[in-house]
Image (cartoon, grey):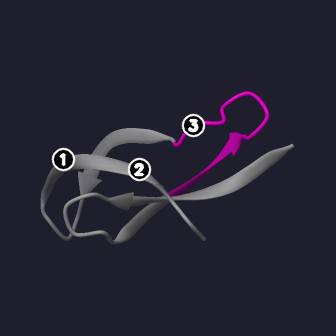
């Protein structure tokens, strides 16, 4: 039921984090504000293709 997703920085587009989500209950793309070690700042990270 749960599927692994990668979170990528919107500024530099590098994939920094990974998590799981329930595709049945959350059909939209996952987005969260997290720290990017490459940009050295907090940016929005959104779900990207594997």
Is 15 placed above or below 22 here? below
Is 20 placed above or below 5 here? above
Residue nearer the viewer, 42 or 1: 1
Q: If the image is split into quadrants, where does the C terminus sit? A: bottom right
Q: Which residues are magenta?
A: 18-29
> For the residue carrying disc 3, how many other residues have a C-alpha within 10 Å: few (<14), some (14-19), or many (20+)?
few
Residue tagged 3: 28
> For the residue carrying disc 1, how many other residues have a C-alpha within 10 Å: few (<14), some (14-19), or many (20+)?
few
User: Is residue 20 highlighted in magenta?
Assistant: yes
Residue tagged 1: 42
- Secondary element at tag 2: strand
For the point 24% across and 59% down, the residue is 36
- Number of the front mark, 3 or 1: 3
Disc 1 versus disc 2: distance between alpha carbons?
13 Å
- Secondary element at tag 1: strand
- For the residues labelled 3 and 2, say whether their Cβ atoms are less than 8 Å apart: no
């Amino acid at each position: 039921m749960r599927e692994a997703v990668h979170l990528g920085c919107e500024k530099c587009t590098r994939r920094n984090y990974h998590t799981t989500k329930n595709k049945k209950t959350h059909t939209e793309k996952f987005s969260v504000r997290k720290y990017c070690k490459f940009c050295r700042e907090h940016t929005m990270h959104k779900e990207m293709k594997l």
